[in-house]
């Protein structure tokens, strides 16, 4: 994502000595979290937040941080995730919303007309490319949902029933996978990143 972000926007990317984008893996209890304006987490349908982690994540988000969660599928994963994020942001004050397709996040750079359902490349190969729903009818529709603060700034964006990051991670593994998924994945990814960093 950082390579494509650098190619397609004038946004500045931090590079290491080998010419790769700098990135960090941080725990929620790591003070370095507050140096990261944009964070991502995957497979949050299995996450377990301690009270300390929940409080730290709340502080991070309310002080201007942003979290994008991706790659969790089906109603059980959704129910688990919403019970965990409720420890961080009480839903009575910070409800989860379905982001409508006319929201600016869908046209920050690219014009995204639908939330793409991007499957893992392993699943896609395993089913011969016949479907993208990893949990059958229980994950048939991809969603982009969000939690905003009182001013409307997105604190958390959730791409559910889709694995947008696999469009970036696996673009070089199979040209057919790239063609089917990567343009849409990058379009949405760069839009979310730009929107998060400018709002």
Image: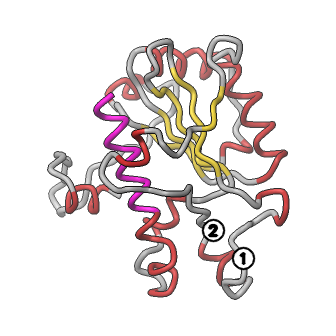
Q: Are marks 2 and 1 in contact (CB under 8 Å)?
A: yes
Q: Nearer the viewer, residue 188 or 16?
A: 188
Please provide percent x and percent y for residue 189. 41, 53
Q: Which residue is mark 1?
A: 131
Residue where numbered disc 2 is placed: 119
**Rendered image quadrant of residue 3:** bottom left
Based on the picture, tell me whether residue 197 belongs to the magenta stretch: yes
User: Is residue 44 found left or right of 190 in the rendered image?
Assistant: right
Q: Secondary structure at mark 1?
A: loop
Q: Is residue 95 magenta?
A: no
* Mark drawn on residue 104: none
- Mark 1 Cα shell of 10 Å, populated few (<14), some (14-19), many (≥20): some
- Above or below residue 68? Residue 166 is below
The C terminus lies in quadrant: top left
| Image location of residue 95, percent across then percent down | 66, 22
Q: Residues within 10 Å of mark 2 (few under 14, many from 20)?
A: many
Q: Quadrant of the N terminus?
A: bottom left
The secondary structure making up most of the magenta span is helix
Region rendered in magenta:
185-199
Disc 2 to disc 1, C-alpha distance: 9 Å
In this rendering, the label closer to the viewer, 2 or 1: 1
Of residues 167 and 113, the one nearer the viewer is 113
Please name whichever residue, 11 or 150, is drawn nearer the observer in this view of the structure.
Answer: 150
Residue positioned 66% across, 43% down in the render: 44
Left or right of residue 10: residue 61: right
């Amino acid at each position: 994502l950082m390579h494509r972000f650098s190619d397609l926007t004038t946004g500045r990317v931090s590079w290491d000595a080998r010419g790769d984008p700098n990135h960090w893996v941080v725990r929620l209890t790591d003070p370095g979290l507050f140096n990261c304006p944009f964070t991502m987490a995957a497979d949050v349908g299995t996450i377990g937040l301690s009270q300390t982690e929940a409080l730290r994540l709340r502080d991070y988000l309310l002080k201007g941080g942003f979290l994008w969660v991706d790659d969790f599928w089906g109603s059980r994963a959704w129910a688990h995730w919403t019970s965990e994020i409720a420890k961080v942001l009480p839903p009575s004050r910070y409800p989860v919303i379905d982001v409508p397709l006319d929201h600016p996040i869908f046209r920050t750079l690219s014009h995204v007309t639908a939330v793409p359902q991007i499957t893992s490349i392993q699943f896609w190969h395993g089913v011969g490319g016949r479907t993208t729903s990893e949990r059958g009818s229980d994950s048939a529709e991809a969603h982009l949902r969000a939690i905003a603060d009182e001013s409307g700034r997105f604190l958390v964006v959730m791409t559910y029933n889709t694995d947008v990051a696999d469009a970036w991670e696996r673009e070089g593994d199979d040209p057919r996978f790239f063609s089917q998924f990567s343009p849409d994945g990058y379009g949405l990814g760069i839009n979310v990143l730009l929107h998060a960093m400018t709002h």
